[in-house]
Amino acid sequence: MLWIETDEQNRPIALDRPRYAADDMLAAARRADTGSVLAALARGEDVNMTDEQTGLSALHLAVASNNIELTKALVEEHGAAFFADGFGRWPSVIAAEMAGVSDELSDYIVLAEARFIDAQSK
């Protein structure tokens, strides 16, 4: 599970609290294990599945772990939806909050999210 806490300078940090099985798609996304996430999707896992307690999806976790390869695969190849997690954070908000998320990934997720919202409004 991904819990967001802050460090002494009030910057968000991620803490991994074990709760997933070793082969769980969300655990793989949290570990930035692109191959395992894609294998789970090939087995039929739902790209938009969420953690029951946090509402985090593989896309939220890929962004939080600064995994642009997985983020792009989820969006471009598997049609991951954009939505708020259980705390009201969209993937773009997680990118802005998490220390260590690259500018490249932040820029990508903001544009992809905007395109998704625009397409949904038509």
Image (cartoon, rainbow, N blue to C red):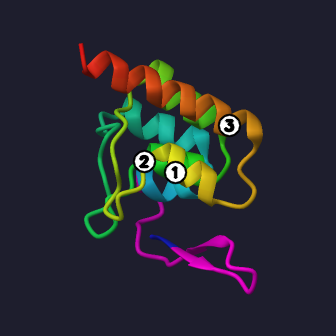
Whether residue 23 is in magenta: the answer is yes
Q: Looking at the picture, which amino acid does disc 1 mark? A: Val
Please determine whether, in this image, residue 4 is positioned above or below residue 27. Answer: below
Q: Looking at the picture, which amino acid does disc 2 mark? A: Trp
Could you tell me if residue 52 is visible in this image? yes
User: Where is the C terminus found, in terms of image quarters?
Assistant: top left
Q: Residue furthest top?
A: 122
Per the rendering, the mark at residue 90 is 2
Q: Looking at the picture, which amino acid does disc 3 mark? A: Leu
Q: x and y percent of residue 10 in the render?
A: 68, 79
Please determine whether, in this image, residue 11 is positioned above or below residue 88. Answer: below
Residue at 68% of width from left, 37% of height from top?
105
> Is mark 1 in CB contact (under 8 Å) with mark 2?
yes
Q: Secondary structure at mark 2?
A: loop
Disc 1/disc 3 C-alpha distance (Å): 12 Å
User: Where is the N terminus found, in terms of image quarters?
Assistant: bottom left
Q: Nearer the viewer, residue 13 or 96?
A: 96
In the figure, is residue 46 to the left or right of 30?
Answer: left
First of labels 2, 3 by sequence position = 2
Please determine whether, in this image, residue 121 is positioned above or below residue 89. Answer: above
What residue range appears in magenta?
4-24
> Is mark 2 in CB contact (under 8 Å) with mark 3?
no
Per the rendering, the mark at residue 93 is 1
In the figure, is residue 64 to the left or right of 88?
Answer: right
- Which residue position holds label 3? 105
- State which quadrant residue 103 falls in: top right
